Image: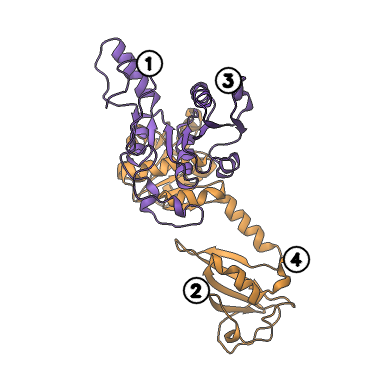
Chain colours: A purple, B orange
């Protein structure tokens, strides 16, 4: 699989390493080259310095048609924009955006974007650990709606074929929560 | 009208002041506390010192009853999210976004932002109008359609000089509608003979340009 990861922070670098050692072709993009220090010496993928919300940068890095596209920077909005570019302009297949604001995460899941929310994951992990009832938010949300573009047919070049008729991103396949805690956002 | 302005930089600040002056109800959101306080000192308690990208605060600012949300921060990704949240989560009828990277325009439109303001594009357009290149000038885009208002300046080398406008082969969907001669605008008639230095005004889709250029400017145009 071709895997693109935007944001080489603690999470991004671990996920990149995992995909890489499982034999997938990985491209990691980050605005700062020092972030790539987190990658292990034996990392075989590409590390590209650039802004993951810039379509040109993503295209040049080879993100077009990626099988998996993960937007994992520290900025919710950068992730949202990067992920939507991946769906609409780059025709990536499974797209996930990290969105730490729970309201925004839920809203974008409704708009057809698979989201993962650290706030929900951690609160639930902690609440579960101390024996309090969890918030009910799943933390990892597969898209429930059709991605936004579908409704607004400004069929401009480059975006035209990005209009999909069905759910995009994770589609119907669930992903399991990447959390070690038993109760933390794995609700089915 | 109730307008929610997000982003208290120069644009947001002056926009808010102007809107108040013309009698609209305005709330400004600015996440930088010091900046928010500074603006509030001057224009009163309509400033909310929170991040307009966060759904919770958008709601508290009254997004659900806003007629317009204007996202004018300096970051395109923030403006996109503000408009999408306003539109889809709070059902705001009209969203306006400032777009800094002109390349983002297509994406923003596609994702449902109602209106885009691109300072970069505007300045670019203005510069293009001032440079006497032998190309077509884009005067304006026409609303939401793909149509553009285009001006062609007929230089000595133009193949259209001496021909009547009715003889020109116009690309499909493209219409000539006026000639500016010696500073005077004239409606186009099909028996009108074109002269050097005429400016021809056309409306057409972006992709008619190549043909239009061939007809009005000539093959040598690209070299200059």
As helix, strand or loop, the secondary structure at mark 3 comes to helix
Question: Who's the residue at 60% across and 82% down the image?
Answer: B168
Question: Who's the residue at 42% across and 39% down the image?
Answer: B28
Q: Nearer the viewer, mark 4 or mark 3?
A: 3
Q: Residues within 10 Å of mark 1 (few under 14, many from 20)?
A: few
Q: Nearer the viewer, mark 1 or mark 2?
A: 1
Residue corresponding to mark 2: B173
Residue B159 seen: yes
Q: Residue A38 has which mark?
A: 3
Residue corresponding to mark 1: A180
As helix, strand or loop, the secondary structure at mark 4 comes to helix
> Where in the figure is residue A167, as x and y percent of width and height?
34, 43
Residue corresponding to mark 4: B223
Q: Count the numbered circles shown.
A: 4
Q: Nearer the viewer, mark 1 or mark 4?
A: 1
Question: Who's the residue at 47% across and 28% down the image?
Answer: B33
The residues tagged by marks 4 and 3 sit, at their Cα atoms, a distance apart of 50 Å
| Discs 3, 1 touching: Cβ within 8 Å | no
Write down the chain letter for disc 1. A
Q: Nearer the viewer, residue A137 or B190?
A: A137
The residues tagged by marks 3 and 1 sit, at their Cα atoms, a distance apart of 21 Å
Q: Nearer the viewer, residue B204 or A52?
A: A52
């Amino acid at each position: 699989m071709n895997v693109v990861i935007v944001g080489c922070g603690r999470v991004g670098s671990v996920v990149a390493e995992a995909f890489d050692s499982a034999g997938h072709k990985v491209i990691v993009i980050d605005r700062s080259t020092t972030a790539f220090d987190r990658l292990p010496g034996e990392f075989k993928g590409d590390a590209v310095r650039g802004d993951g919300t810039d379509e040109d940068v993503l295209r040049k890095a080879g993100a077009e048609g990626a099988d998996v596209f993960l937007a994992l920077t520290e900025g919710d909005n950068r992730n949202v924009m990067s992920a939507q570019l991946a769906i609409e302009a780059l025709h990536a297949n499974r797209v996930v955006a990290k969105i730490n604001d729970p309201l925004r995460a839920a809203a974008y899941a409704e708009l057809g974007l698979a989201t993962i929310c650290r706030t929900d994951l951690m609160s639930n992990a902690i609440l579960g650990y101390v024996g309090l009832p969890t918030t009910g938010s799943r933390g990892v949300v597969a898209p429930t709606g059709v991605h936004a573009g579908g409704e607004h047919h400004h069929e401009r070049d480059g975006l035209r074929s990005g209009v999909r008729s069905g759910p995009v991103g994770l589609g119907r396949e669930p992903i399991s929560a990447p959390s070690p805690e038993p109760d933390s956002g794995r609700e089915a | 009208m109730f307008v929610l302005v997000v982003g208290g930089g120069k644009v947001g600040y002056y926009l808010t002041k102007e809107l108040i002056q013309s009698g609209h109800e305005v709330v400004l959101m600015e996440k930088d506390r010091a900046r928010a306080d500074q603006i509030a000192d001057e224009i009163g308690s309509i400033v909310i010192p929170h991040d307009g990208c966060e759904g919770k605060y958008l709601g508290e600012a009254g997004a659900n009853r806003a007629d317009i949300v204007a996202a004018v921060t300096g970051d395109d990704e923030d403006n996109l999210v503000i408009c999408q949240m306003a539109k889809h989560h709070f059902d705001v009828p009209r969203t306006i976004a400032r777009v800094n990277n002109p390349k983002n325009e297509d994406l923003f439109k596609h994702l449902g932002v109602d209106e885009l303001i691109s300072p970069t594009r505007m300045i670019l357009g203005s510069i293009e109008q001032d440079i006497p290149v032998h190309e077509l000038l884009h005067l304006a885009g026409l609303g939401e359609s793909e149509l553009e208002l285009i001006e062609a300046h007929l230089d000595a080398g133009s193949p259209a000089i001496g021909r009547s406008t009715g003889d020109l082969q116009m690309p499909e969907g493209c219409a000539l509608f006026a000639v500016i001669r010696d500073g005077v605008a004239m409606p186009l008639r099909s028996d009108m003979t074109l002269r050097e230095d005429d400016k021809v005004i056309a409306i057409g889709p972006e992709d008619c340009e190549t043909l239009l250029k061939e007809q009005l400017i000539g093959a040598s145009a690209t070299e200059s």
